[in-house]
Amino acid sequence: MKKIALALALAAPLPAFAQQFTGAELSAELSYTTGSDVFGATSYTGAMEFQVAGPFSVAGDFSFNGYRAIDSNARNFTVHGIYDTGYDIMGGVFVGFDSFDSSDSTVYGVEGKFNMAGASLQGFLGYAEGDRDIKMFGFDGDFSISPEIAVTGIAAYGTRDDDDLARVGFGGKYRFAQGPVAYGEIGRISNDDGSENYLTVGARVALGYTPGTSFSRRGIADIFRGY
């Protein structure tokens, strides 16, 4: 409970500063793996970000990943503290609560983002402590090839006492005239027991002055599909 209270406290209104809503997003997606361990997942996510004072912002995001084939689900709620340098570089810290069925962990770490004309790249270094202890890091980015179309990529690696995890994926997204985004990704996930290809398709709606939020989700199941 103390860990949840800490995350909520970071996201709570700060009366000493004037908060300004900057962006939010909602998304839904379907994921499937191929090979001997075929399974599907349905995911729902949401996020919201506020500027609290000058270059400082706070964002909160949640995710729900349901796995019907194994009657399980994973949930995550994370708060990000963000500093914008004003030179196309952002830095931040994050802390969150992660749950997979009855296994609970606290996730925390540091993250950074670099924006350039038509492209962005972000990375993180994090830890999960609790029922699932994992050290993890990763990168993801996108590159616009037109106002409507962008290509995306992600790579992540994690390690724990009895397993190593990895994910590599490439995809694309298309922004419709009224704002919704359709996206897809193909990639490969692996651990010490083997590896599987995966396919993800989804849709996202972003709102706000700067639509969406600054950083990606940091839940274990969000980073390492299905783990």
Image: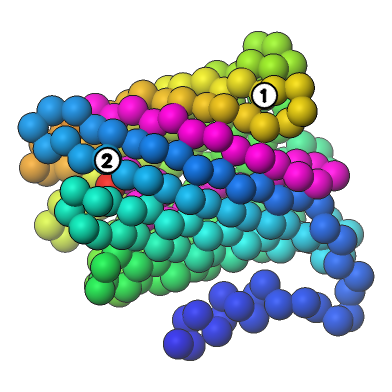
Residue type at mark 1 is Arg
Q: For residue 68: magenta?
A: no
Which quarter of the figure has residue 207? top right
Residue 10 seen in the current view? yes
List the residue tagged with mark 1: 175
Residue 163 at x, y percent in the picture: 16, 52
Q: CA distance from mark 2 to mark 1?
A: 25 Å
Q: Secondary structure at mark 1?
A: strand
Residue, x 21% and y 40% (percent of image)?
A: 39
Three-letter amino acid code of the residue under disc 2: Gly
Pointer 1: residues within 10 angstroms few (<14), some, or many (20+)?
some
The residue lying at 73 percent from left, 26 percent from top is 116
Q: Which residues are magenta?
A: 197-225
Direction from residue 30 to residue 150 in the image, left or right = right
Residue 198 part of the magenta segment:
yes
Residue 9 is left or right of residue 68, and the answer is: right
Please provide percent x and percent y for residue 15.
Answer: 86, 81
Residue linked to disc 2: 40
As drawn, the label of residue 7 is none
Q: Is any atom of residue 133 visible in this view? A: no
**Quick check: 9 above or below 227?**
below
